[in-house]
Amino acid sequence: MLELYGVSKVFPGVKALDEVSLTFKPGEIHALLGENGAGKSTLIKIICGVHQPDEGEIYLNNKKLNLLNFRDAIDNEISIVNQEIQVISHYSIAENIFLDKLDRFKVAGRINWKKMNDQAKKYLNLVGLNLDPTIEIGNLSAAQKQLIQIAKGLSSNAKVLLLDEPTSSLTSHEADTLFSILRKLKEEGVILIFVSHKLEESISLCDKVSVLRDGKHVGTKGCQDITKQEIIKMMIGRETKEVYFGHLDINVKKKALEVNNLSQTGRFQDINFHLNEGEILGFYGLVGSGRTELAKIIIGEDKMDSGNVIIQGKKANINSMSDSIHKYKLGYVSENRKEEGLILEETVKTNIAITVWKRIINKLFRNISLNHEELKAQEMIDGLRIKVQSSDDIIGSLSGGNQQKVSIAKWLAAECDILIIDEPSVGVDIGAKEYIHQLIWDLAKKEKKSIIVISSDLPELCMLARRILVFKENEIVGELNDINDRQHSYEELSGRIGQFLT
């Protein structure tokens, strides 16, 4: 049994945890929920030895723990699947899985690589990834990296396993695979602590739910005795309502983006689709189905072998992200904001204005107009209600929801007419998710932006998109094109998509 008594933690200017007392039992999946900034991540980092509490005590099986670092946690059979993707890009998959457990494979001071790769393959199979464990991890998608991090957590054979947003980039199919693994671990008596912003999956998977708000423990209830709305009220102090955004006025006579016969050797063959003006088009599919990979070809980050991209009726020649932004007003919000979308050590202002530096440079002195940079950044901060003290705040210090707003803001600052938004609400809380959904809708409805939303969250796509393309094995295998009005239930749409994937 894992027991926390009166745990408190203070960072400069904020009390992250305020006398939190919780009990986690073996053979139980225990959800830990709350908005961004509620204290969840701080609490699990304390359990893992990354942070030390200022006050309070932690006991594991009646033994008081004094964890000074993550190695201490591992020694006490405590492990974590982190929310943030933490990989060493030029290392192999196997090396990333066993980086903190290399002693297992040492023989006479040398690593038995065959044994390590064989063990890595076992855990890759467990999470449903058919990948060579010897390949470098750097070129894989965010979802594949997330599954590898889950494999890394499982490889610890821990008695206490914490999972921080483990399904944030996974479709329901991959999440179901993970849940089967967790239920098996539960039967084996493992203590499982599950952190997620997806409330439905928490209720269906977990035995208990504990809610934090503003660093305090609000309450713990059995999942069979609580509803989604009750959890939301505990999290934010108020109730919310399911939103139906309404009818989208799509200009079907004007195609903002067309992709014709796009092919890439070894991956895509004759891909065709279009995006209308003022439309929200959904891309859905399992990990590795080609959704993100296709988007990166369209924006010039990767190359096609043949085919055409047509923007606003004219053939586009996009060889780089710079071409995409400055020549064609086409922007891409990355699914992996930490590694690709943001410069974490830079300011909010720099991250927002970086896409417009070419426009605000002083032509005489060849330097950036700091006044224009500040005005553009502040315009986005105010318009998107980004919570900062000033535009000079370091982006890495913001919550996940506010980081995601900045990811979107930089492309709005560039005045893009076409936006590809990859996993728009990954790792953000219910309040930020509502705001981002409303923002995407307003961009299409009010400003006539043309938007592709790539998402593993099927309810999110069914709420926002008015047409959905279904991807499987680098092909578009199906299309739902009659969901502009509320004439189909989520269950019906989900069932139709499932038929394309079987």
Image (cartoon, rainbow, N blue to C red):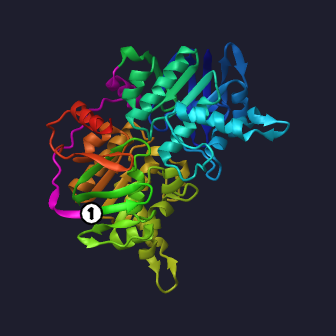
Q: Quadrant of the N terminus?
A: top right
- Residue under pointer 1: 258
Residue 84 sits inside the magenta stretch: no
Task: Give above or below for 392 relative to 424.
Answer: below
Task: Give above or below for 137 relative to 8.
Answer: below
Q: Quadrant of the C terminus?
A: top left
- Image coordinates of residue 465 in percent, x first then y, are 25, 46
Hey, which residue is sitting farthest right in the picture? 108
> What's drawn in magenta, residue-wise?
227-256
Q: Is residue 22 left or right of residue 319?
A: right
For the point 30% across and 42% down, the residue is: 461
- Image coordinates of residue 139 in percent, x first then y, are 54, 53
- Image coordinates of residue 195 in percent, x first then y, are 49, 30
For the point 26% across and 73% down, the residue is: 314
Q: Nearer the viewer, residue 97 or 378?
A: 97
Res 198 quadrant in image: top left
Residue 385 visible from this viewpoint: no
Circle 1: residue type: Glu
Q: Is residue 352 left or right of residue 160?
A: left
Residue 229 sits inside the magenta stretch: yes
Residue 462 visible from this viewpoint: yes
For the point 34% across and 25% down, the residue is: 228
